[in-house]
Image (spheres, helix red, strand yellow):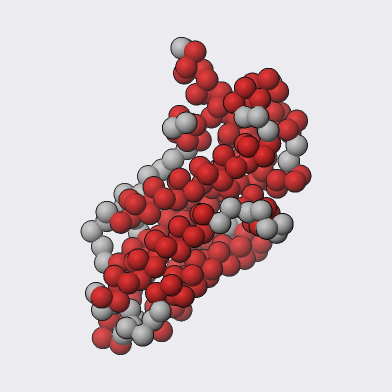
Amino acid sequence: MSQQARAVATRAQIVLGAAETFEKQGYVGASVGTIIENAGLTKGALYFHFRSKDELARFIVAEQHAISIASVEAIGREEASAIEQIVMLCHEMARQIVHDPIVRAGIRITLELSADEQGPADPYLDWINACEQLVRRAIVQGDLKSDIDPPRFARFVIGAFTGVQTVSQVLAHRTDLEQRVDDMWMFLLPGIMPDDRHPDIGRIRTARSVGAPVVGAGQVAARR
């Protein structure tokens, strides 16, 4: 293995070990020693790539953000209506939370740092902005009622999803998250779609992305 390849592999190992540690113990609870132990590397290896725990945590948040934006862009290329893409976005966010430790760690770090008004807002703002654009398109396409306010509704959707996934984590360790997101749309769609579009609700609820990228820790580190 070349020196560059080894460096990429080591960085990926550090990121994955740190993500698992932050997810379980939070930012404050995670120690550099535990991160090193989970990564199976030395302190020197960690500090070669990251100067501090804070830098490593913010790297993970940035990667969570990058993963989410890549998914938003992929869903935007789907041949589907805007309302279907909004549903796809929520289900893809749920899939990432269930299957990607970097996403789970990034969310936990963001929420924890936000308690002290230090949390990065970019991931949530970008989700809201992407959803807002889709809401505007869905109104034009006739799939959402014309009196819906796009910025307010977009913020509500992301807030509702955040609440759904939080309760799913507390009550079922997210094993039922897919169903809970489906329930969210089952209750929302009849109230926000014009009556003449109600026959489409069943199809819209089943909308899932087929093009969203699956990004693992190795691919994440390799991008840097």
Question: Relative to 139, does residue 112 appear above or below in the rendering?
Answer: above
Q: Estimate the x, y position of residue 47 in percent, counting from the top left.
A: 66, 25
- Residue 8 can be seen, yes or no: yes
Q: Residue at x 29, y 70 (%)?
A: 137
Task: Looking at the picture, tell me which residue is in the foreground, 53 or 209.
Answer: 53
Q: Estimate the x, y position of residue 194 in percent, counting from the top left.
A: 31, 85
Q: Estimate the x, y position of residue 165 in percent, counting from the top left.
A: 56, 62
Residue at far front of view: 117
Q: Residue at x 36, y 85 (%)?
A: 147
Question: Relative to 213, does residue 133 appear above or below in the rendering?
Answer: below
Asked where in the image residue 197 lies, by quadrant, the reply is bottom left
Q: Estimate the x, y position of residue 199 in percent, counting from the top left.
A: 28, 80
Question: Relative to 146, does residue 44 appear above or below in the rendering?
Answer: above
Question: Relative to 57, does residue 212 appear above or below in the rendering?
Answer: below
Left or right: where 149 falls relative to 8: left
Left or right: where 194 falls relative to 23: left
Asked where in the image residue 193 lies, by quadrant, the reply is bottom left
- Residue 90 can be seen, yes or no: no
Q: Residue at x 75, y 30 (%)?
A: 33
Residue at far bottom of view: 195
How many numbered tags mark residues here?
0
Asked where in the image residue 169 lies, by quadrant, the reply is bottom right
Q: Residue at x 58, y 35 (%)?
A: 16
Task: Looking at the picture, tell me which residue is in the foreground, 133 or 173.
Answer: 133
